[in-house]
Amino acid sequence: MKLCSACLLGVKCRWDGESKSSDKVNELLKKDLLIPICPEQLGGLPTPRTPSEQRGNKVFTKDGKEVTEQFNRGAEEVLKIAKSFGIKEAVLKQKSPSCGCGLIYDGTFSGKLIRGNGVTTQLLKDNGIKVISEEDL
């Protein structure tokens, strides 16, 4: 049993109201139970929503609104789910400000990637949960 970014399972929960269904994740679903999560929705953000990126320890929308609190709240809710099910591993969406694992956008909305983890990924890792991206499957 693993947590999985809901957008990778075809749920239309991304910032643009779309999904990012992954063939690799759908193959994994045939062998393992995947619990879909969307930290941004769990944090109270709407779908669709203005795109967000991390700048340091804060998260901002493209139009400059700080949404750090919602991202942190969503990450905490995901951690509660993980703990309640005894989850030890998660497959999360690469490059996302919530779910990015190893690579995230640099906060300038220019498409530039930097090394780092999304808010939820970092919290899960800090609590001993292994996180991989769909690209690592």
Image (cartoon, rainbow, N blue to C red):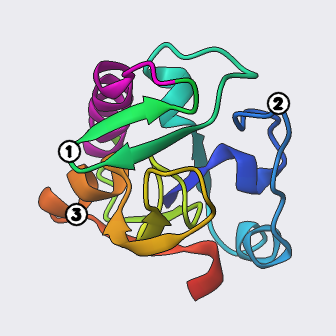
Q: What residue would you read off at disc 1? A: 57
Residue 107 in percent (x, y) is at 44, 51
Q: Could you say which disc has been placed on residue 17 in the image?
A: 2
> Residue 112 in magenta?
no
Q: Is residue 10 above or below residue 29?
A: above
Marks 3, 2: nearer the viewer: 2
Marks 3, 1: nearer the viewer: 1
CA distance for labels 3 and 2: 27 Å
Say whether residue 89 is left or right of residue 111: left
Question: Magenta residues: mostly which secondary structure?
Answer: helix
Query: What's the amino acid at mark 2?
Result: Gly
Report if the CB atoms under discs 3 and 2 are less than 8 Å apart.
Answer: no
- Tell me which label, 3 or 1, sits earlier in the chain: 1
Q: What residue would you read off at disc 3? A: 125
Element at label 2: loop
Element at label 3: helix
Q: Residues within 10 Å of mark 1 (few under 14, many from 20)?
A: few
Query: What's the amino acid at mark 1?
Result: Asn
Report if the CB atoms under discs 2 and 1 are less than 8 Å apart.
Answer: no
Q: Nearer the viewer, residue 53 or 6?
A: 53
> Residue 68 in magenta?
yes
Q: Quadrant of residue 63?
A: top right
At 31% from the left edge and 64% from the top edge, which residue is drawn?
A: 88
Residue 49 in percent (x, y) is at 68, 22
Q: Nearer the viewer, residue 73 or 83?
A: 73
Residue 110 in percent (x, y) is at 61, 58
- Tell me which label, 2 or 1, sits earlier in the chain: 2
Residue range (magenta): 64-83
Q: Residues within 10 Å of mark 2 (few under 14, many from 20)?
A: few
